[in-house]
């Protein structure tokens, strides 16, 4: 069994520990040596702080331009510039939460600005302004505020009830919005989770009817509709009418909480997800084909982790969508112990860090996709980190099987 890794202390506690360490060094140095040590520390910290200030200044300058731009091509250039800036900062500091926050923030602003431009553009198509209030809601990594450097559209639209003309308005509006988001740099979702798909667009009443049919097993293709409900579990307001969005999100959570068999089905699906660890703690790699010898970080590590944490959070009705925030709340609710949460938190950082590094290599043209990792290119320590991450996911699956009586 891989050894547990100590979790870094909170910032204030870390600073206090660091001060004690420095004080310990100073007691062993004379006046000149002690002064030199403090000067060196000051210079290094100032260089790092200045580097971070420069990143923030460049980023804030780009963010401030978004609201003023009136063309999709200009927004696309901003998207590319900000993605490049976040990649540079990640390579310098390797902070997963910093990249999540940065990418989610600027993409929310870009999506909101694109929405405004589409509203203005569609007036020129003789459709007029939106006839009723509506909202754009994100799901997937965006819904969890876990955006990375490569993303696609995972959006739905919900609007106030109206007649057939209102439905037709938002059909045409959504179709245009999806195209314009793609022009700005938001790739179209390969799973078609976009408001141009009628499954992901509807009035308040239509959405309630759809959700009711899913949880009552009234739709065919049970597996697909269960997966749709899982995707909806990460819903988050992005733009438009906030009240409509938040009411819709509460409706989704209410349906999930009201039908235990739905959560049980989600839990069963989560515990059946394959984790890439073979017998004797070896990392699973593709035995043949174009990915022979490679490990799929997303499919065999990151996705099972996110999915299983989500199930516990949904079962308790926790409001958070972020995986790391969900883990914190699960510990507070005593659904998971401190040791398990520490291991799962570290697993999330390790797996997501690999995903981001793969994305950077993919964007540079150094490899064809952003999912497959060659374990042989890792250091022995990195391979052990990867193994520890997957052991913690398997342990989480065991906990969920027990909690939900899944055989």
Image: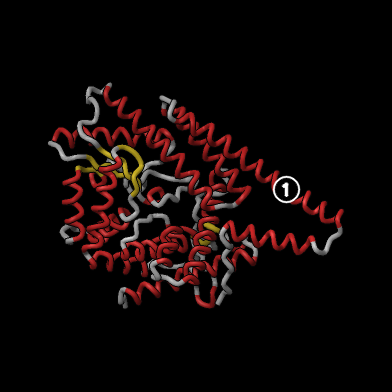
115, above or below 208, in the image: above
Extreme-left residue of the structure:
163
**Residue 197 visible in the snapshot:** no
In which image quadrant can residue 262 be found?
bottom left
Residue at the (40%, 52%) spot, across then down: 144
Residue at the (25%, 54%) spot, across then down: 252
In the image, 74: left or right of 237? Answer: right
**Residue 399 visible in the snapshot:** yes
User: According to the image, label 1 marks what residue?
Assistant: 44
Q: Position of residue 27 (x, y in %)?
A: 80, 63
Q: Which residue occupies the foreground of this view, 240 or 377?
A: 240
In the image, 261: left or right of 271? Answer: left
Residue at the (19%, 51%) spot, across then down: 210
In which image quadrant can residue 245 be found?
top left
In the image, 308: left or right of 22? Answer: left
Q: Position of residue 298 (x, y in %)?
A: 46, 58
Q: Which residue occupies the foreground of this view, 86 or 196?
A: 86
Residue at the (56%, 52%) spot, across then down: 95
User: Disc count in the image?
Assistant: 1
Quarter of the picture holding the C terminus:
bottom left
Q: Residues within 10 Å of mark 1 (few under 14, many from 20)?
A: few
57, above or below 156, in the image: above
Q: Position of residue 58 (x, y in %)?
A: 57, 34
In which image quadrant can residue 353 be found?
bottom right
Q: Which residue occupies the foreground of this view, 18 or 234?
A: 18
Q: Position of residue 62 (x, y in %)?
A: 52, 32
Quarter of the picture holding the N terminus:
bottom right
Picture colour scheme:
secondary structure
Q: Which residue occupies the foreground of this view, 314 or 270?
A: 314
């Amino acid at each position: 069994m891989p050894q547990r890794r100590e979790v870094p202390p909170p910032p204030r506690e870390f600073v206090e520990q660091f001060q004690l360490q420095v004080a310990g060094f100073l007691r062993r140095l004379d006046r000149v040596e002690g002064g030199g040590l403090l000067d060196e520390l000051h210079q290094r910290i100032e260089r790092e702080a200045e580097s971070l200030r420069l990143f923030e200044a460049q980023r804030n300058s780009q963010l401030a331009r978004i609201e003023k731009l009136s063309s999709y091509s200009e927004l696309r250039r901003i998207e590319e510039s900000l993605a490049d800036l976040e990649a540079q900062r990640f390579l310098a500091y390797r902070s997963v939460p910093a990249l999540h926050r940065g990418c989610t923030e600027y993409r929310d602003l870009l999506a909101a600005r694109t929405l405004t431009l589409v509203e203005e553009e569609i007036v020129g198509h003789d459709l007029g302004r939106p006839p009723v209030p509506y909202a754009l809601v994100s799901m997937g990594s965006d819904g969890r505020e876990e955006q990375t450097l490569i993303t696609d559209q995972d959006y739905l639209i919900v609007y106030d009830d109206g007649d057939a003309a209102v439905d037709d308005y938002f059909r045409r509006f959504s179709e245009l919005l999806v195209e314009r988001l793609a022009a700005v740099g938001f790739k179209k979702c390969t799973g078609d989770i976009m408001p141009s798909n009628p499954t992901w667009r509807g009035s308040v009443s239509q959405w309630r009817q759809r959700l009711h049919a899913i949880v009552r097993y009234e739709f065919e293709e049970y597996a697909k509709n269960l997966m749709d409900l899982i995707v909806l579990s990460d819903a988050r307001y992005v733009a438009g009418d906030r009240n409509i969005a938040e009411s819709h999100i509460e409706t989704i959570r209410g349906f999930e909480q009201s039908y235990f068999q739905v959560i049980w089905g989600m839990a069963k699906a989560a515990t059946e997800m394959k984790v890439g660890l073979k017998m004797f703690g070896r990392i699973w790699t593709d035995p043949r084909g174009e990915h022979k010898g490679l490990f799929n970080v997303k499919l065999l590590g990151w996705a099972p982790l996110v999915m299983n944490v989500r199930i516990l959070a949904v079962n308790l009705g926790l409001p958070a969508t972020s995986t790391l925030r969900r883990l914190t709340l699960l510990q507070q609710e005593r659904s998971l112990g401190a040791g398990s949460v520490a291991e799962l938190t570290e697993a999330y950082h390790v797996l997501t860090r690999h995903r981001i590094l793969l994305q950077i290599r993919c964007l540079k043209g150094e490899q064809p996709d952003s999912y497959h990792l060659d374990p042989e290119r890792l250091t022995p320590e990195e391979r052990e980190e990867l193994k520890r991450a997957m052991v913690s996911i398997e342990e989480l699956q065991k906990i969920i099987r027990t909690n939900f009586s899944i055989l």
